[in-house]
Amino acid sequence: MTADVQVQEEVVRRVMASTQVDREGLHSAYSDVRDDKSDVNWAVFKYEGSQVTVAAKGQTFDDFKAQFGDDERAFAYLRIQTGDEMSKRSKFLMLTWVGTEVSPIKKAKMSTDKALVKEVLANFAVELTIESAHELDHEAFLQELVKAGGANYGTGFRD
């Protein structure tokens, strides 16, 4: 076996090592996003070695968009207000980010890691997987949530 093959096998072994999830940290951030009294509208979870941890929480969508790099993998949970002039309600979206420069092995591992994260982030109306910054679009996310919500009875006028 050549040294290059041994190095490649070691890389594969490390990447495929069991991912750990900071369940307590993720649950706390998840609860902040779900709490209507909280100013936190989103939370982003990234890898620190083989552990998924809370990387950031925030209020504005611009700050949210700044959290994702082309060479990163991440998960996110967002609260977006939907409804019409008569009724406003919070809806939740789970996002899986796989940057365009992430290796194929790490991309493949995302599906099993996502299952671990979804054990904590259990309630959401829409789940999306995206890989480029132009897909981080608040209006597109809102439209996906509206579609998932079913009927939309707004009249456009409020008396």
Image: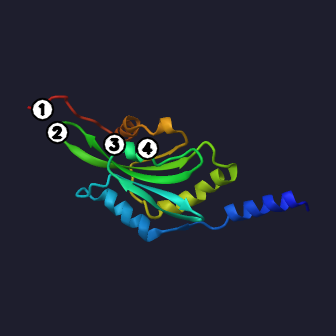
Return the residue at label 4: 65
Tag in front: 3 or 4 = 4
Circle 1 residue? 158
**Of the residues shown, which amino acid type is indicated by label 1?**
Arg
Residue drawn where x is 28% and y is 59% of the image:
35
Marks 1/4: CA distance? 33 Å
Q: Residue furthest top?
A: 156
Q: Count every numbered label the image shows and give the total.
A: 4
| Protein image colouring | rainbow
Residue placed under numbered mark 2 in the picture: 86
Mark 2 vs 3: CB contact within 8 A: no
Q: Is residue 11 left or right of residue 40?
A: right
Q: Residue at x 50, y 47 (%)?
A: 68
Question: What secondary structure is marked by label 2?
Answer: loop
Element at label 1:
loop
Q: Are marks 2 and 1 in contact (CB under 8 Å)?
A: yes
Up-down relation of residue 115 to residue 136 (above or below): below
Of circles 4 and 2, the one toward us is 4
Q: CA distance from mark 3 to mark 1?
A: 21 Å
User: Which quarter shows the N terminus?
Assistant: bottom right
Figure quadrant of residue 9: bottom right
